[in-house]
Structures are given as structure tokens and as C-alpha cells.
Image (spheres, rainbow, N blue to C red):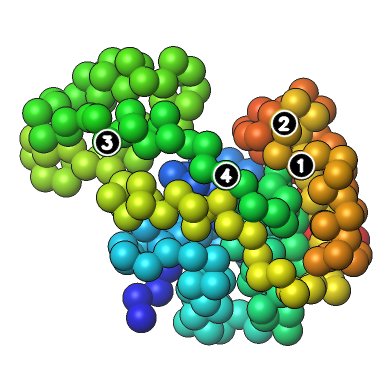
Amino acid sequence: MTTLHSKIIGEGSPLIILHGFLGMSDNWKTLGGQYAEAGFEVHLIDQRNHGKSFWSDDFDYDLLAGDLKAYMEAHHLNRAAIIGHSMGGKTAMQFACSYPELTDRIIIADIAPKYYPPHHQAIIDGLNALRLETMTSRNEADAALGQYITDFGTRQFLLKNLYWIEKGQLGFRFNLKVLSQKMNEIGENINPTDIYNGPTLFLRGDKSEYIMPNDITKIKKHFPQALLQTIDRAGHWLHAENPKQFFEKSLAFLKG
């Protein structure tokens, strides 16, 4: 099996960081550098069908957790702490439950162990409507995407995935065809009987609705040691919207 692509920075205890849906490792470059300066060997991962990692028609959280296990074996990592945002948080949850012996502790950023109905359809529709074969610049792609997605920040996040496959031919780093078909899988919960008894921190944005008060019972069922903390002035993209507080709270937990 092809090993996941990553960027590794720093020296010390292994810390794996997993991006969210339609993201990539580069989204975490700045925070990754800060964790490296704090004494961690940081592995910024591209999950399958994202970034520079391999593409596959198969996509679910058991497979994503298995990819991470294979990555750790390939890089001779006996145990690691893991930070995962959104979809990456689901991967981190499933990994910790399936492979607790490889997991030092986990930080889950703004996602709960529950099923989320597909809610990215406007984004998927907008991306699928782009005719990249006729486009000659990012600005052209941005203008076309703007007809579907009005939020500038969301468009910039998505368009970071654009690259020149060859001269004159733009493409996406993510596997849009497969991810469009796997929207239900992305919203899936971890396995219902899964439990991870190790140290766990859930961080939620105070403006986000991804983790609600009535989710706490389910969080504690799967993760008995779980702590829940809130990042101020932040929505679902809490690590980008308040990186200072995200770093402080996560580092205190990682060093604890």
C-alpha cells in the first residue's frame, strides 16, 4: 500500500496532525512549526484522496485509521499524540479506538462522535461546476466558484488545492470525484462499541454548532477521560480563527 504523504518538522515526541475535509497538511504549517519549536517531531499528514497522498475509490474511517497505522509503521513510530480537525478528528477518534497501543493522547478539534448529515453539497456542486480545462488562472477559478460560494475565506481555503498539473492545465489536489460520492462516509460516526480510555481533549469553537451540550454524554461513552474546552471567538475553523488560544490549550494538554 502507498504510504501517506507528509511533511515532518522538529525533533522530540511524535505529534501527528490530521486536516479536515477538502483540506491538506499545508493548512497546519504555521501551527505545526510552533509545536515543533515546543519540542515535538510534527508529522503534517495528507489523508488519502487529499493533498499529495494517493487516490483511492475506497474511503471510510476504518481505512483512514489503517492508513495512519501503516504510516506509523513506515516511519518507525511506536506511539504518537494526534491532533485531528473535523474529518481528521473522526480519523483520530477511530485510530485511537482501534489502535490504543499506538496512541499517546488525542486532541479532537470541533467534531463529536456522532453522525453528521451531508452538509457540504453547495461546496461540492460549486467545485464540480468548475471547468478547469478551460481556465487559465486562479482568479478565473475564484470568480466562477464565487457564483456558488460567497464566503471569500472558504473559497481561498478550497483554491489552495489548485495546482498546475502541467503547463496550461489546472487540477485539484483532492479527489473530487470520489469525495463527491462519499459524502455519507465523511459524516459517519466511529464504530458504536468503540472506546478509547487514554487522555482525550475535545476543543470546540464558541460560535460553532458541531459540538452541542447534548453530545457530551456520547463523548464520555466513547472517551471516558475526555475533557471539553472552548476556544473563544471561533467557529468550526477554530485553529485558524484563534490560533493563539488553540495552541495554548492544546500545548498544555500535550505537555500534561
Tag 2 residue: 208
Q: Is residue 145 above or below residue 13?
A: above
Residue 98 is left or right of residue 186, and the answer is right
Q: Nearer the viewer, mark 1 or mark 4?
A: 4
Judge whether residue 15 can be spotted in this image: no
Question: How far apart are the alpha carbons under marks 1 and 2?
Answer: 7 Å
Which sits in the foreground, 102 or 21?
21
Q: Secondary structure at mark 4?
A: loop
Label 4 Cα crowd, 10 Å radius (few <14 / some 14-19 / many 20+) = few
Tag 3 residue: 128
Q: Position of residue 1 (x, y in %)?
A: 36, 81
Q: Residue at horizontal 85%, vertical 74%?
A: 197
Judge whether residue 233 can be spotted in this image: yes
Which sits in the foreground, 106 or 166?
106
What amino acid type should be assigned to the residue bearing mark 3?
A: Asn
Label 1 Cα crowd, 10 Å radius (few <14 / some 14-19 / many 20+) = many
Q: Which mark is residue 137?
A: none
Q: Nearer the viewer, mark 3 or mark 4?
A: 4
Which sits in the foreground, 249 or 61?
61
Tag 1 residue: 211
> Do tag 1 and tag 2 residues touch (Cβ < 8 Å)?
yes
Q: Position of residue 140 (x, y in %)?
A: 22, 19
Question: How far apart are the alpha carbons under marks 1 and 4?
Answer: 14 Å
Label 3 Cα crowd, 10 Å radius (few <14 / some 14-19 / many 20+) = some
Q: Which mark is residue 117?
A: 4
Question: How far apart are the alpha carbons under marks 3 and 4?
Answer: 20 Å
